[in-house]
Amino acid sequence: MAIADSIARARDAFARSAWTDACFHFAEADRDHVLEPEDLQQLATALYLTGKEVESADVWARAHQEFLQLGQVERAARCAFWLAVGLQERRDHRARASAWVLRAQRMLDEQQRECVEHGYLRLSTAFDTLFKGDMAGAFAQFSDAATIGKRFGDRDLIALAGHSCGRLLIRMGKPQEGVRLLDEAMVAVDAGEVSTIAMGDVYCSVIEGCLEIFDLRRAREWTTALTRWCESQPDLVPYSGQCLVRRAEILQLQGAWADASAAAAQACERLLLRGGHPASGAAFYQCGELHRLRGEIANAEEAYRSASRYGRTPQPGLALLRLAQGHTDAASTAIRLALDDAPGGPNRSRLLAAYAEIMLAVGDVTAARTAAEELAVLAGDLDAPVLRAMAAQANGEVLLAESDGRAALGVLRQAWTIWQEMSAPYEAARVRVVIGLACRLLGDRDAAEMELDAACWIFAHLGAATDLARVEALRPGESPAAAHRLSVRELEVLRLVAAGKSNRTIAAELFISERTVERHMSNIFAKLNVSSRAAATAYAYENQLV
């Protein structure tokens, strides 16, 4: 009776997505190894979702054996697939994962019977093919898996194979077709039609794909959805780390650097608890970027080093760090090598933007022009606002280096408008610096001073120490401080408060938590010496902050 009660509680916990409770109650019932293979499947899933991949693999292996003893070869093969999925995420278990896939394939071949499990194993084969660099072969295998999934009506397989095809199409230079497949997979996720593991995998992969092509609208939307999904399952481990990395990237772009740093640090902590998950490299790189922007050289260098240890190339961040340190030879050598090794496609664009900046710093205007032109071609192919802004900015900087101030102003103002529309204060401020220099070249010193002053104000409130020092060195006299001393994010919050928005609405619009909004409001009240939203609103209007 006690065992039956434990199994009932375990199944109930699993149905409620209470993964830790499910693990506890299943383990309690399984002291004498009495669980049915279906219950073992649920226990293996719950263990995986709480970050215990090795223990999960052991239980999948037990379920596999139990199904074999019952003569249910297809279900045994499915267990082998999910066992391999957990092992493939750990670099020291990939050979073991491949062995399980090969065993499952041999078992199914001996059966000589069509079943959906052939499609799942085709997924594993496709990932191995992709790892070897054969994108065309991998795409064909993913497509076969999707076809098998549709034939058997298996929604997990359709979503997993379909979104993988979408990711490959993006990398193969067909972003529109790729995004269509990503959207199809996300419809199934959004409707709750797929299992938890499939849902988490598709969420993280689709967001990564959107960021690859700089589709920030989709990335923000799906990251918000993923965040809510993770928060609804507090003991969920595998996807929360990746979610935090993407959240940190978006928060950084929006100028919420403190929140971005907290998210990136938390991502590192969670991913390291999983034994150094491959996404740890991306988390450390994001930490490095935020340290670099704030001028924290030693911390940035250590973070980039950690990113490299976990398989993430530290470029272009490390090259830009060397540039900030004044080590121009090291910066130019590093960025040249990184660009030489980079394949074509959207991921190359970040390297191109950094390459153009560094080449201008070392005086190689011709190389910078070549990079700016390639960036413009990429921007035209994808038609993504971020890429258009990056391309316009690089082109404007090259035109300025070629002493064509009037032409530079035109494209730089286009770049500034895009960054402003995207609420990307740091990038917008960097463009204003170049606009100021172009105005100075054309003899408009008042306009130049106003642009540089505005850039300094943004850099000061963001904490962009290196950029602030560089711009202040370009200006005669002392840099004025804003009288109200509000940060860029606090100013955004104040403007929304003045528009009558609630904390919940502000949190949704700025992609932050309500608690963070409350903290900003507390800081605003203290800095403005007011005690209510009404008083803060009055101050904003009186001082022309809205």
Image (cartoon, rainbow, N blue to C red):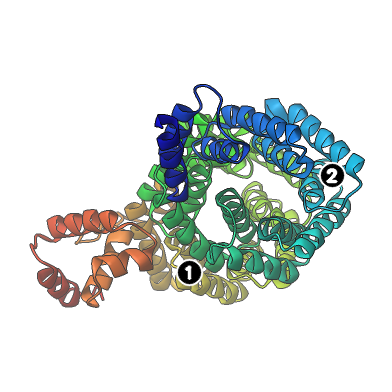
- The vertical placement of 93 against 11, above or below, is above
Residue 5 shows in the view: yes
What numbered label is drawn on residue 422? Answer: 1
Location of residue 103 in the rendering, given as x and y in whole percent from the top left corner: 83, 33
The residue at the point 26 percent across, 76 percent down is: 546
Left/right placement of residue 363 relative to residue 417 reads right
334 or 95: nearer the viewer:
95
Q: Earlier in the sequence, mark 2 or mark 1?
A: 2
**Which amino acid lies under the numbered mark 1 shown in the image of this protein?**
Met
Location of residue 376 in the rendering, given as x and y in whole percent from the top left corner: 71, 68
Residue 322 shows in the view: no
- The vertical placement of 344 against 41, above or below, is below
**Which amino acid lies under the numbered mark 2 shown in the image of this protein?**
Thr
Location of residue 486 in the rendering, given as x and y in whole percent from the top left corner: 24, 59
Q: Which residue is mark 2?
A: 129
The CA span between labels 2 and 1 is 38 Å
521 or 404: nearer the viewer:
521
The residue at the point 81 percent across, 62 percent down is: 147
